[in-house]
Amino acid sequence: MTVLLTVVFSTAGLALVNAATTNADPANEETVWIEIAIFVFVYFLPAYVAYKRNTSNKDGIFLLNLLFGWSVIGWFVALVMACGSAGHKRERSPLISEPLFRVFGRGPTRKMH
C-alpha cells in the first residue's frame, strides 16, 4: 500500500510541479487532479469489479491488482479473474434437474402415485 501511495503522490507531485512551472492556471491544476483520480480508478478497476460481483477471491484479486497491476499483464489477469465466476453458486432448477436424475437413475426422485 505504501508503494502505491508513493507512486500516486509522486506522480501527482510531478504533475503539479510541471503544471506550476509551465502555467500557473488553477484550472490546469484541477485537471491534473481529475486525471490522477481517473488513473487510480482505472488502475483499481479489477478490484472494484471483484468486490461488486462478490467473487470468492476478491481479496486475492485486490492484492494481485495492487502488486502486479503496474504491469499490463497483471492488470488484465486481475480483470479476467474479477469477471470470472461470482462468489455464490447457482442452484439448479428442480424442474430441469429432477427429471434428468430420474432418467439416469441418480439423485433425488419422487415416487409417482
Image (spheres, rainbow, N blue to C red):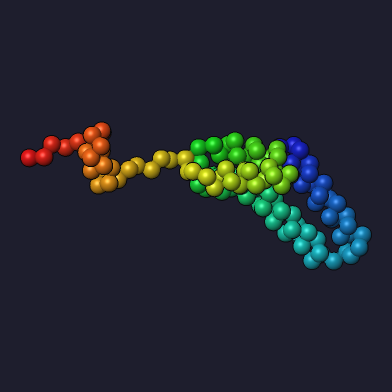
Task: Return the x and y of residue 27 as percentages of the image width and height.
Answer: 79, 66
Taking the image as shown, residue 94 lies to the left or right of residue 29, namely left
Whether residue 16 sits left or right of residue 37 in the image: it is right
Q: From the viewer's perspective, is residue 58 above or below residue 36?
A: above
Residue 88 appears left or right of 61: left
Q: Quick check: 97 left or right of 25?
A: left
Residue at (60, 39) in percent of width and height: 61
- Please state which of residues 74 and 49 is positioned toward the viewer in this rendering: 74
Residue 104, horizontal then vertical, whole percent: 25, 37
Q: Pick the residue in front: 24 or 63.
A: 63
**x and y percent of residue 43 in the render?**
68, 49
Q: Residue at x 51, y 41 (%)?
A: 55
Image quadrant where residue 26 sits = bottom right
Q: Residue furthest left?
A: 113
Q: Quadrant of the N terminus?
A: top right
Percent across and percent down for residue 108 are 23, 34
Mark yes or no: residue 34 visible: yes
The quarter of the rendered structure image containing the C terminus is top left
Occupied quadrant, residue 23: bottom right
Q: At 50% from the left edge and 37% from the top edge, which residue is drawn? A: 56
Residue occupying the point 76% across, 38% down: 3
27, 72: nearer the viewer: 72
Seen as rendered, the residue at the extreme right is 21
Say above or below: 17 vs 75.
Answer: below
Seen from the viewer's position, the closer of residues 98 and 28 is 98
> Can the viewer see residue 98 in this picture?
no
